[in-house]
Amino acid sequence: MRRLRRGNSALNAVLLLYLLVCVAPSFVFSIKVNTPAELHASKGGTVTLSCTFTSTSRPTSKMTVDWSYTPQSGGPSQTFFHFSSKAFLPSVGQFLNRIQWQGSPSRGDASISLINATLNDNGTYTCSVRNPPDVHGSPNSHTVLTVTPKKLSIRFSDVAVLLGFIVLPSALITLILIGRMLCPKKQHNQSKSHRSPIEVTEGEEYGIHQPDGKVKKATCCNLYLMDSDDEYEYYNQKKRPSTDEGYAESRC
């Protein structure tokens, strides 16, 4: 009976030791990485690929972060970013000069930013964190990025600028054109009411007066301004006896 109890105790000890060896590391040395399931961005904008992690060990210089990308159309995954004590940005490929390190390992942050997002960036992004001796747990996490064309939006300030640079100048030009159309008409009316002293009108030619006007004698100035044909006709009429009262002789 005692031997049976001793045998059971030994078996229990072996089982407990096995559990400690196999299961304990998963609780003591473990790491967990978290990323959003989905992210959305507008074409030409900047999007932050968020990645956080928790580790039972304090991050050291041996900690590493890797970001990889799998196209939406499928294909092999490619690693485009690596961090180990410092950030190693992409030197070739579609992410060249478009990645910024935003992480802070001491705070459990391994995020990056994608600049000038394009429709070709649609796909799955994987964040992997290693922090030895934490080698168990969930060191990887995935997020799906969807980039859409930028929507056209008009703000109130944009409308104000359009009004200032288009509507107001157009209104000013319209007022100027209306003014130019009215001014010549006004001047034309004034020219009709103020005739020149030497202007010859119908009924006044050759000294003939309107019925309600006074007789105005011809002057040297008037004779000088006559055309040659008019002057010849004037002298012929002067030689003939005047039968009308509408002629005036020059006294030059």
Image: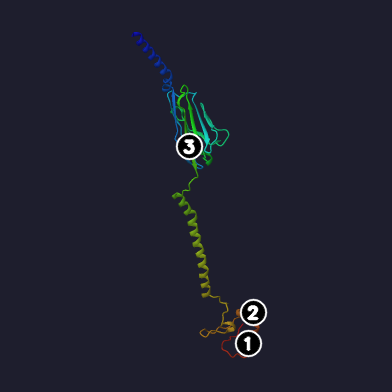
Where does the N terminus fall, quadrant-wise? Answer: top left
Quick check: 1 above or below 25?
above
Element marked by disc 2: loop
The reply to whether dot 2 and dot 3 touch (C-beta < 8 Å) is: no
Crowdedness of circle 1 by 10 Å Cα count: few (<14), some, many (20+)?
A: few
What residue is shown with label 3?
A: 144
Q: Residue at x 48, y 38 (%)?
A: 145
Quick check: 133 above or below 234?
above
Crowdedness of circle 3 by 10 Å Cα count: few (<14), some, many (20+)?
A: some
Q: Position of residue 91 (x, y in %)?
A: 57, 33
Residue type at mark 2?
Answer: Asp
Q: Foreground mark, 2 or 3? A: 3
What residue is shown with label 1?
A: 237
Where does the C terminus fall, quadrant-wise? Answer: bottom right
Element marked by disc 1: helix
Q: CA distance from mark 2 to mark 3?
A: 98 Å
Q: CA distance from mark 1 to mark 2?
A: 15 Å
Marked residue nearer the N-terminal end (1 or 2):
2
Q: CA distance from mark 1 to mark 3?
A: 111 Å
Residue type at mark 1?
Answer: Gln
Crowdedness of circle 2 by 10 Å Cα count: few (<14), some, many (20+)?
A: few
Marked residue nearer the N-terminal end (2 or 3):
3
Element marked by disc 3: strand
